[in-house]
Amino acid sequence: MYGQIAAANALSDVYAMGGEPTFALNILCFPSSLPLEMLREILDGGYQKIKEAGAIIAGGHSIDDPIPKYGLCVSGMAHPGKIWSNATAREGDLLILTKPLGSGITTTAAKAGVITPEELAPSAAVMATLNKGARDAVATLGASACTDITGFGLLGHAEEMARGSGKTIQIFAGKAPLLPGVLSLAERGMAPGGAARNQEYLQESVTFAQDVAPALQSILWDPQTSGGLLVSIPERDAGELLKRLEEPCPQAVVIGQVLPREDVSIRVIH
């Protein structure tokens, strides 16, 4: 599962630009003190996802290192005139999010022993899901702008889109799709350090309505691993895109809208 999640995360950047992955290189740090069977399973998980993406693993690099690390360097192809940008959102667009939020919170809770491996399983399954199905659905309609939600959290990546596009984005916090149990964990203060760093970095660019609960704010700052796509699409096409996302991304929802530029990049309402 670790290998699958790492590969899905690495592939996500190509999908977020409307591209097709072609080949990947394994990047591996692994301690000689751990069993080789564990190493084999990690690499096999990565291979499974690269194969699912229709790409190939063309080699890689490995070193002996005390802390296990695994990722992939992925290359892909896209038509020059059809590459999606994260800086071209248009006023009036709706924003659709294709995966639920909270993977940073659930993995932090798992490391702390607060939740069991069985309780973590739904989060792991979401992280291991490729954004290929979402990319395919969006490609049939086109997008004004697109990005994937990873380490900067929903608000961080939305802020990049707003700033790059010269617009303000309004987020509907109450519409946010959440992983099972995440809200309860957030209410207990179970947040990774990256969430606080995201908030500190962007606090001058984001405002919250008074009725957005602190726990929900924490989830919006939560750094994601292999999160979904955030798609800016004309309002006339949003309903059709949601229909096309029903099978590959059943929790996809309209999470916000693009407004004229204001004094902040992001406004969060309930």
Image: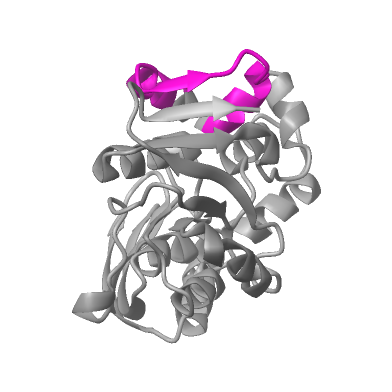
Say which of 89 and 80 sits in front: 89
Say which of 28 and 170 sits in front: 170
Which x, y percent locates residue 153?
Answer: 47, 38
The region drawn magenta spans 196-220
Say which of 203 and 24 sits in front: 203
Which residue reaches farthest top? 210
| Residue 206: in magenta span | yes
Colouring chosen for the image of the structure:
one colour
Q: Residue at x 27, y 70 (%)?
A: 83
Quarter of the picture holding the N terminus: bottom right
Which x, y percent locates residue 264?
Answer: 36, 23
Q: Quadrant of residue 245?
A: bottom right
Which x, y percent locates residue 210?
Answer: 62, 13
Query: Vertical placement of 142 versus 205: above or below?
Result: below
Q: Is residue 8 left or right of residue 214?
A: left
Q: Residue at x 32, y 33 (%)?
A: 261
Q: Residue at x 70, y 57 (%)?
A: 251
Q: Is residue 65 left or right of residue 131?
A: left
Residue 44 seen in the figure: no
Which x, y percent locates residue 185?
Answer: 73, 28
Query: Vertical placement of 37 versus 166: above or below?
Result: below
Q: Quadrant of residue 41?
A: bottom right
Q: Residue at x 73, y 54 (%)?
A: 122
Residue 24 seen in the figure: yes
Say which of 122 and 68 sits in front: 122
